[in-house]
Image: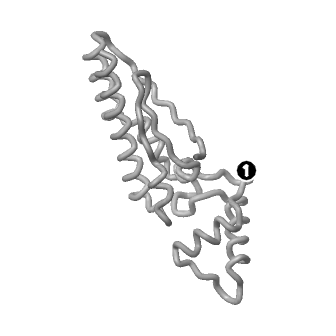
Amino acid sequence: MEKEIKKILADYSRSFAKRLKQGLLADNANASGATVRSVKHYATSEAGYITYSGVAGIVSDGLRPGISQPDVRTIMDWMKRKGITPQGNRSLRDSAYLITRAIKRRGTIKRKSYNGTGILERLANDRKLNERLQNELSAVIGEEVFVITKINVTQI
């Protein structure tokens, strides 16, 4: 039974990770590809795990106004990858500073009304994915199982 449970959890983890990668790409939140590449999955006989960089958590949840702001160098790198050039006679560093200040004041992401994309919450609350896991585990264990999906953002 332990092997069967581990296989079910591994399949669930794989599906969740695949859908997370697809969601990050669909939400257009993939400047360099590092965030998508950071998504990994594995399972034990007790749980399925999906790991990802802290950036995926920021993309999903956004940064609330007044809480924190990204490092200027991080924004400079992002601008380069996105092909964003400074306007007027501003330097790249000056433009990146203005962006970090705007994030501190307004939060992220502008096209999402300064909120995150919500990809992690959407996946954690995906009834179809969770019901499939519950049904498969219940069939193996022989009694009804309730699944609680916990999102825990850990920077790797």
Residue for point 59% across, 52% down: 62
Q: Splitting the image into 4 quarters, where does residue 141 fall?
A: top left
Q: Which residue lies furthest to the top in this view?
A: 143
Neighbour tally class for label 1: few under 14, some 14-19, many 20 plus, Cα within 10 Å:
few
Tell me if residue 99 comes above or below residue 142 in the rendering: below
- Look at the picture and state if 95 lies above or below 24: below
From the viewer's perspective, is 23 left or right of 107?
A: left
Seen at 67% across and 88% down, the residue is 88
Which residue is painted at 56% across and 58% down in the image?
Answer: 113
Give how far across and how far down residue 70 sits, in percent: 68, 59
Spot occupied by residue 114 in the image (x, y as percentages of width and height): 59, 57
Q: What residue type is labelled 1?
A: Ile
To which residue does mark 1 refer? Answer: 67
> Looking at the figure, which quarter contains the N terminus?
top left
Give residue 129's position: percent from left, percent from top: 33, 34
Query: What's the residue at 52%, 49% (across, down)?
Result: 60
Q: Which of 12 and 145 is in front in this view?
A: 12
- The answer to whether residue 28 is left or right of residue 4 is right
Residue 29: x, y in percent? 48, 60
- Outermost residue on the front side: it is 3
Residue placed most toward the observer, 114 or 68 = 68
Number of dots carrying numbers? 1
